[in-house]
Image (cartoon, helix red, strand yellow):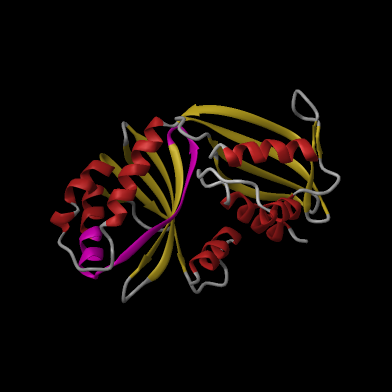
Amino acid sequence: MSSSTLEESLRRYLMSFDGKKKEFSPSLKRAFDSVYHKEFYNRTSKYDISRDKLLQIQMQHLTSGTRVVLVSFHPMSSSRIFYKMCIIPNGASCYQTYYNVTEVKDGKIIRPIKSSMKDFDATGLEIVEYKLNAYIAVFDGTIKHFSQIEERFDDLYSSEFIEEVANETPVTKEQMRVHATELLFLGTKAKIVSFVPIDASHFKAAIHVQNDFSNTVVESTATIKAGKIVSLRNVIYMTESETSPQWMKFVLQELSI
């Protein structure tokens, strides 16, 4: 099994940790088995964690409604990967970022080599996520005037806002306003595919944008301040591209695009 297959298996497994309380089903156990090697053990923590203990911990997260998202996944060699997850306890504004360098055997995680956990206050992120959802919801595929979104736009984007797109001139808030006006005029439909906290001041989001002239997924890395977005770094992927990264192919598969 390749690292890309392991990444897809891990993403599929973590999708079940969506913040809704549920029981650990047989299908989820199979997903767990596709990620963690039968010989798994963890001796990087204060206490040794066996595979059975890991399963119990993750079952507790699931039944308590913990949300878990994969922030990044990077192969380091044929037998070693680095990945970062964000753990979001149900009803709490204190999130945890989990960093892990781990060995891989037979395409599955077998032994963490180095790991660390860091807590951060996600109150600002939660405010921005709420505002972003409200803003994107207006792009429902019908033609609208900017006045119908202006209040949400100004509530989401800081007066200092700047957008950076690879190999292009940075975009100001006023230019972003013009672009949003054009998208609304075209009857654009937009959907937040993922919202991934990175730390107290940053998040990554993937947004599917579609109208008669374009069908893309925009990957944004955002910086926030005082409950608003102050900067974005965007990478735009065409949905038919064969060179999209693994996470992107997974997104397109889930959207059935």
Q: Is residue 199 magenta?
A: yes
Image height check: is 80 above or below 217? above
Q: Position of residue 170 (x, y in %)?
A: 33, 51
Image height check: is 248 above or below 60? below
Image position of 62 (left or right of 45):
left
Q: Position of residue 199 (x, y in %)?
A: 49, 34
Q: Nearer the viewer, residue 160 or 1?
A: 1
Q: Residue at x 66, y 52 (%)?
A: 25
Image position of 11 (left or right of 176):
right
From where the camera sits, is residue 195 visible? yes
Q: Nearer the viewer, residue 188 or 165?
A: 188
Image height check: is 65 above or below 167? above
Q: Which residues are magenta?
A: 179-201
Q: Position of residue 181 (x, y in %)?
A: 20, 61
Q: Residue at x 63, y 36 (%)?
A: 60
From where the camera sits, is residue 112 visible? no
Q: Residue at x 16, y 55 (%)?
A: 148
Image position of 71 (left or right of 125):
right
Q: Position of residue 89 (x, y in %)?
A: 52, 34
